[in-house]
Image (cartoon, rainbow, N blue to C red):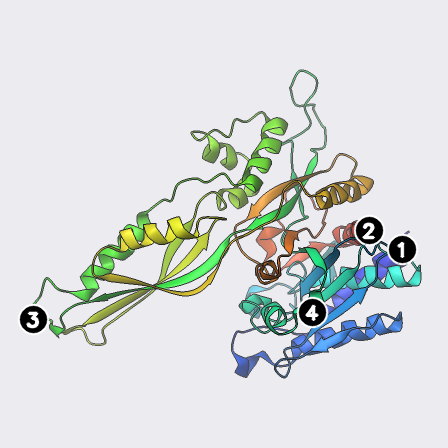
Amino acid sequence: MTSLLEEEALEFVRELIRIESVNTGDPATIGDGETRAVRFIQERLREVGIASELIEPRPGRGSLVARIPGSDPGAGALLVHAHVDVVPVEERDWTRPPFAAEIHDGYLYGRGAVDMKNYAGTVLAVARHLARERIAPRRDLVLAFLADEEAGGLWGAGWLVDRRPELFAGVTEAISEVGGFSVPLDGDGRRDEDGDEAPGADPRRAYLVATSEKGVAWATLTARGRAGHGSRPTEDNAVVRLAGAVRRIGEHRFPIVRSPAVTRFVEAFARARGLRFSDETIEADLASLGFVGEIIGASLRNTATPTVLSAGGKTNIIPGEATARLDIRVLPGQDAPLRETLAALAGPGVEVREGRWWSATEAPVDAPLLDVLGRAVAAEDPDGLVVPYLLPASTDNKHFARLGIAGYGFVPLRVPHDFDVLGQFHAADERVPVDALRFSARVTAQILRKA
């Protein structure tokens, strides 16, 4: 028999999916979905006596913040945040309506099912549960439901940090995406006392917690040369110079950097699977983990990927300028070395001009909060193990880090061993097991109560 907490969590997730809060990145086409979503949340909070403030820096771009007092005034407040915007959909690629929130074969389908209206609805349900049961959390809880994460958070978390930092007074840590989902820890089964796999045993689960996130940056390469007629080639050709820089950067493999989060991950999986994860074997060892290894493999190195090229307008004219844009993902503490490497690879005559640059975030891998996460998971999955990892993407935690808030990614979901939660982000037929949402509600309630 499911509890009211679990039923409300499922109901609210479905209701939020049905609110089309698509963030196209274009103010002309975004609409008012974000504000409608947070108004829905605000009303559900008001029903149980929880006050909140709706902040709308632009029409339709609403965010909502509420604070629930804790029982320990000396403890730092905990920020719990979820974004209410979602990425666009190509409906022809979906087999289920992306905004209908239909349930089929035990899965809830819809844009936002994992990214991340599932957590917004769950946190809303937990807040109502605490209010109904008159349960005071240990720490003050600051609940933030945010606009614009999918386009960088400039009108959501970034705007609030810049313009309304008092809303987060006293906050020391945050919980949000992307983590908490289960992955198989033991491979095909548990190991017996001799180290052999026990036939038929169900693998233990690791619940990944993002203690760190790669930074995200953009840069433009600009090469200049002598313009002229295409019939008279010149050695001072901007296109050729740029092409050389793009090739060098595109082919470069940055060195492996073992961050604290990566170190903790490989330690846990080395013990569970008998792997070495040495410098010589780490990539092969990660490959043996399947989709789990792909996630971690992307967190080993800095990357700089050429994505957009631009030069000239007519085939018979040598342009005087050529440009290329780079998508850059930077590991913690690697900003300066990465900049130096890019300048060296670009070479003489090619300017590297930085655009948006958000550095990586890094929170302690041994904080007491991780013990709370572990106990909450163990109450529902006694063999489950919370394992740190480095998220190779970025979230709104990058904005809150500017206030000194240590951000963690942990949305608890116990899923089938072959279900790649991270693979559902931005995908067609985005879905989540209904049982995983119920598990999420129970575990999140324990975390927010006892953190």
Which quadrant of the figure has residue 236? bottom left
* Identity of the residue drawn at 71% across and 59% down: 171
Q: Are marks 3 and 2 in contact (CB under 8 Å)?
A: no
Mark linked to residue 3: 1
For label 4, the SS is helix
Q: Are marks 1 and 2 in contact (CB under 8 Å)?
A: yes
Q: Is residue 256 above or below residue 22?
A: above
For label 3, the SS is loop
Q: Earlier in the sequence, mark 4 or mark 3?
A: 4
Q: CA distance from mark 4 to mark 2?
A: 31 Å
- Name the spot of residue 381 as percent of width and height, x first: 78, 39
Horizontally, residue 62 falls left or right of residue 106, namely left
Is 342 in front, or is 288? Answer: 342
Q: Earlier in the sequence, mark 3 or mark 2?
A: 3
For marks 3 and 2, give the one nearer the viewer.
2
Considering every residue shown, the one lying at the far front of the view is: 74
Q: Earlier in the sequence, mark 1 or mark 2?
A: 1
Horizontally, residue 209 falls left or right of residue 3, namely left
* Identity of the residue drawn at 74% across and 56% down: 78
- Name the spot of residue 194 as percent of width and height, x first: 66, 15
**Labels in figure, total:** 4
For label 1, the SS is loop
Mark linked to residue 442: 2
* Residue assigned mark 3: 231
Q: CA distance from mark 1 to mark 4?
A: 36 Å
* Identity of the residue drawn at 85% across and 60% down: 7
* Identity of the residue drawn at 79% across and 39% down: 378
Amino acid beneath label 2: Arg
* Residue assigned mark 4: 166
